[in-house]
Amino acid sequence: MSCPVYHAAAELNPVLLPIDWLLGAWESDEPGEGSFPSIEPFRYTETLHFSHVGQPMINFMFNAFHAESKKPMHWECGFIRMQPGTNRVAFIIAQNSGLMEIEEGELTGKQLNLQTHALARISFAKKPHVKQISRVFQLRSDGRLEQTVSMATDNQPMMQHLHVIYRRPS
């Protein structure tokens, strides 16, 4: 027996109209750049998929690959919710590194500003542990999507970790 698949073209829940610009597929336009004091700088490509099934949430999956070797690097998946009648947004995220997080923030125009609300990790997660994350998504005037991720760990203060610009695949 297989899992049921939702086939009908569901109508977008009206709560999500302010962030409907995220929906669909995105891929990095040029390789993104990552750095942090505890690692070597790197370049990566990434695909983003934002979808919905008519419920008051957006489902997402982010897949990152090393720009040169094309090896898988990082996966994130989860849900985006909006507090009805407000500009409050929450990302509920599971990462393949064993980190689970809730980021909350506000939508201003076509920009999402999110910060860590809660973090949990597997008991054998690699150290140093991530302590805080902030993320900004901005829909640019040229139609591209920009993401900047900053983080703090046990031994590093909050600083930029990732920056990438996406376009819709042709």
Image (cartoon, rainbow, N blue to C red):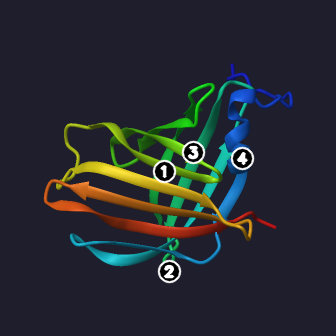
Label 1 vs 4, first from the N-terminus? 4
Q: Quadrant of the N terminus?
A: top right
Q: Dots 3 and 1: beta carbons under 8 Å?
A: no
Against 8, residue 168 (above or below) is: below
**Disc 3 from disc 1: Cα separation:** 7 Å
Instruction: Name the secondary structure under disc 1.
Output: strand
**Disc 1 from disc 2: Cα separation:** 30 Å
Q: Which residue is mark 3?
A: 107
Against 51, residue 44 (above or below) is: below
Residue 52 lies, in percent from the top left, at 71, 34
Q: Which residue is mark 1?
A: 113
Q: Nearer the viewer, residue 34 or 75?
A: 34
Inspect the image, locate mark 2, and give the three-letter code of the amino acid beneath it: Glu
**Disc 1 from disc 4: Cα separation:** 17 Å
Label 2 vs 3, first from the N-terminus? 2
Q: Which residue is mark 2?
A: 68
Inspect the image, locate mark 1, and give the three-letter code of the amino acid beneath it: Asn
**Disc 2 from disc 3: Cα separation:** 34 Å
**Disc 4 from disc 2: Cα separation:** 28 Å
> Which residue occupies the extreme right position in the image?
9
Q: Nearer the viewer, residue 46 or 86?
A: 86
Q: Which residue is mark 4?
A: 23
